[in-house]
Image (cartoon, grey):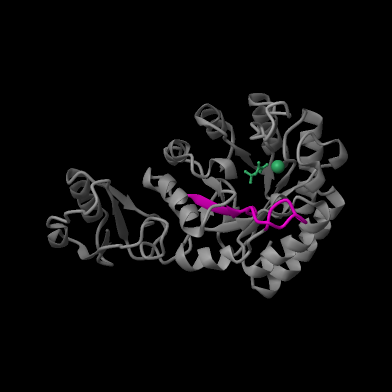
Amino acid sequence: MLVVMKPQATPEEIQAVCDHIQQLGFRPHPLPGAQRTAIGITGNQGQIDQGNIEELSGVAEVIRVSKPYKLVSRDIKEEDTIIRFPGTNITIGGRDLAMIAGPCSIESREQGFACAEAVAKAGAQFFRGGAYKPRTSPYAFQGLGEEALKIMAEIRDRFGLRIVTEAIDAEALELVAEYADVIQIGARNMQNYSLLRAAGRKRKPVLLKRGLSATLEEFLMAAEYIMSEGNYEVILCERGIRTFTDHTRNTLDLSIVPAVQRLSHLPIIVDPSHGTGKRNKVTPLARAAVAVGADGLIVEVHHQPDKALSDGMQSIYPEQYEQLFHECSQIAEILHRNI
Ligand code: PEP
Ligand code: MN
């Protein structure tokens, strides 16, 4: 359900409506950044008895939202969500594309710094690096854990890059939320509802990757889990899905970008690295992602990809990233966007 406030409603009136909703046993969600103040109401009892909300001072109208996803929907908030990073002019979801790059995993302080220096030089605003890795084999490199988080905190200080890193479980989430600027939830965890809820209780933006075989609706419902806990800063990420095709690791489904943008106000970025699994296909698909209207790119870059402990085959060299960056910024310009 959606309560639309009158344009002249005061903060006190908005608060009174939120309190009323809470007293009825539901959760009010006054979404930030919407021009008209709209308060989403969620509850788990099915049909919500709207009581006398309509009669409260400052309320313009009460609308039922019939879609299964509510807070992620443009029905609740028409304006695009723009995520801001305090103390910087970096945004995700605005006119500027978010360029996130770095190695799949942090392997050592030297390796992390070498990769960070390269992506900062190319112009990226965000550094990615895995501290906790969801590996197919339990015997493969699992990440350096908190040590990697500490290295990335140093990288933020040294290069001014915001840090994006994955939380694979509730335990990792606590540390990731402490050190990182953006909490990544990986494809394999897209339907780990308890982890989604826990991330929703953190007050840091969440980068949610699409599950390996998730439909658009399942993807949006996963974002809804995070938002239903009061964290409205969710970034969706297309990272390729499983198909019969075997010339790439996954099939990058770029058509989901305009599909998401039609239904949701949340930003959506693209990962051409996991989306293809092959170094020589990363830049072409990155260009396509920008052309299709993605709000940013997350790319695996390694200074020595042949020695990488994870995802070396799809990691591009620093020079290739510079070229990718240059080509993508030219495409972005045509769309009146900046990188
Ligand atoms: C990653 O970003 O390194 C990763 C493991 O991604 P995904 O969850 O999309 O496989
Ligand atoms: Mn990876």
- Report the side of 158 relative to 12 (left or right): right
Tell me if residue 158 can be seen.
Answer: yes
The picture places residue 114, in percent across and down from the top left corner, at 82, 38
The picture places residue 269, in percent across and down from the top left corner, at 61, 57
Name, please, the residue furthest toward the front. 244
- Report the side of 192 relative to 31 (left or right): right
The quadrant where residue 57 appears = bottom left
User: Where the C terminus falls, by quadrant?
Assistant: bottom right
Q: As displayed, is residue 240 above or below residue 309? A: below
The picture places residue 108, in percent across and down from the top left corner, at 77, 28
Name, please, the residue furthest toward the bottom. 334
| Residue 236, magenta (yes or no) | yes
The quadrant where residue 161 appears = top right
User: Where the N terminus falls, by quadrant?
Assistant: bottom left
Q: As displayed, is residue 239 above or below residue 158? A: below
Q: Residue at x 56, y 29 (%)?
A: 172
* Picture mark count: 0
Q: Main secondary structure of the magenta part?
A: loop
The residue range painted magenta reads 233-251
Tell me if residue 160 can be seen.
Answer: no
Q: Compare residues 51 and 121 and report the one nearer the observer.
A: 51
The picture places residue 35, in percent across and down from the top left corner, at 38, 65
- Report the side of 226 relative to 21 (left or right): right
